[in-house]
Structures are given as C-alpha cells and as structure tokens.
Image: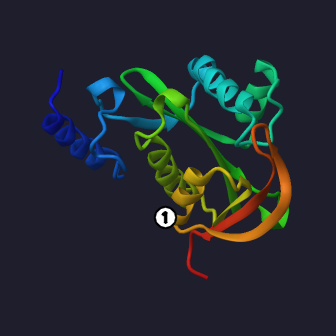
Amino acid sequence: MASRAEARCARRLVCAEIGVALRQPNRLPYNGFLSIMKIRPATEADRDAIWKIFHEVAAAGDTYALDPHMSREDALAYWLAPGTHTYVAEADGRINGTYILRPNQSGGGSHVANAAFMVPASARGEGIGRAMAEHCLKEARRLGFHAMQFNFVISTNTTAIRLWQELGFQVVGNLPGAFCVPAKGYVDVYVMYRLLVEN
C-alpha cells in the first residue's frame, strides 16, 4: 500500500493534470490509490453509473428539490435532456461524479448558465466536487455563457455553499423556509450568482 508521502506526491501530479487543488491533502482518496481523474462528456455507456449516483443523491432528499422516488427513466431524461451538457468524473474506470451545464433561462436569459453537481457519498471529501466545479466554469466560458446562477442552494448544504463562495459566487437572494429537509424541517434556500466575463 502507498505511503502517505507517496500519496501526497500522487495528489500533486493529479492536481497538475486537472488544474485544481484537492482540499484534504492528508486523506488517502480511493482507498490509498489515486489515479488521474478525467472529466469528460457523458456517453450512453455512462447511463447506469449516472442513474446510480442520481438515485442516491435524490433519494436522500436533503440537497435537491427533486422527487426522491423519481424513476430511472425520468431521472435520465432530466439529467441528459436535449440542450443540457452532461459530464462525468472518471477515475480507475469508475464514475465518481457527474454534473450538468445548461442555460438558466431561454431567450434573453440564455447567456446565464445553470449547473448541478452530484457525487456519491463514497467519493465525497476527495476534491471531486471542486474539480467538476472548476471544469464547469471553464466549460461555461468556452460555451459563451456570461454568468452562472444557482437557483436553489439549500442553506444547510454548507459544504457546497463554502465551495461556491470560494469560487467567486455570491448569495444574491434568500428564500425563507423554501425547502423541507427530512431531518431538519423547513430551511432557507439561497440564489447564488457569479459573472464569468467582464461587463
């Protein structure tokens, strides 16, 4: 098994490859072995892996305003909808996360992007969410979006909020008691926003 020093060295190589810094350098991700993570557009072959992640995250009912009992067919239709750019994070031949990128509105609002990210519990805390977020911001700029908006960030999802703020997002709106977390009851929801180009 790799030593901690070897694992830290491997992390530095991975950070150079994907252009992000993993946030917990003293943990051993992937059970002590870290391969190069690749973030790429999703393919038909990824449908089962995406459904597995989607179902786990949606069923928890604490981070997305999605039906926790949504069927596989409806979930994949939502996540892989026409006009939506869908990506997966892959390491060791395994999908460890997925995100979508699309216009937040149509017509005059189509220059503002919207995105959603999902990482299974088994892969959290290893920098996958941050890697996908930074990849997403680059893709949004490449696709010509001027800004990005998250419409419904649950206030109890503090890990996500901290990440978005570190990446330049600001809370621009508060929706009091707009979401019911199964274990906590009604909590606030934030609208978060950041520019991608200079005005």
Q: Is residue 42 above or below residue 146?
A: above
Q: Would you say 191 lies left or right of 2 here?
A: right
Which residue: 20% across, 35% down? 7
User: x, y percentage for residue 176?
Assistant: 84, 62
Residue 87 placement: quadrant? top right
Q: Nearer the viewer, residue 21 or 37?
A: 21
Q: How is the image coloured?
A: rainbow
The outermost residue toward the bottom is 199
Q: Is residue 143 above or below residue 122?
A: below
The outermost residue toward the front is 184
Q: Is residue 192 above or below residue 14?
A: below
Q: Nearer the viewer, residue 161 or 96?
A: 161
User: x, y percentage for residue 145?
Assistant: 63, 62
Q: Residues within 10 Å of mark 1 (few under 14, many from 20)?
A: few
Callout 1: SS: helix
Which residue: 83% across, 32% down? 67
Which residue: 76% across, 56% down? 104
Location of mark 1 (residue): 166
Residue 18 visible here: yes
The number of numbered discs placed on residues in the rendered structure image is 1
Q: Would you say 80 lies left or right of 68 here?
A: left
Q: Quadrant of the N terminus?
A: top left
User: x, y percentage for residue 32?
Assistant: 27, 27
User: x, y percentage for residue 5?
Assistant: 14, 38
Q: Would you say 15 lies left or right of 62 here?
A: left
Q: Amino acid at mark 1?
A: Glu
Q: Nearer the viewer, residue 190 or 141?
A: 190
Residue 111 visible here: no
Which residue: 34% across, 52% down? 21
Q: Would you say 120 lies left or right of 15 here?
A: right
Q: Quadrant of the C terminus?
A: bottom right
Residue 45 placement: quadrant? top right
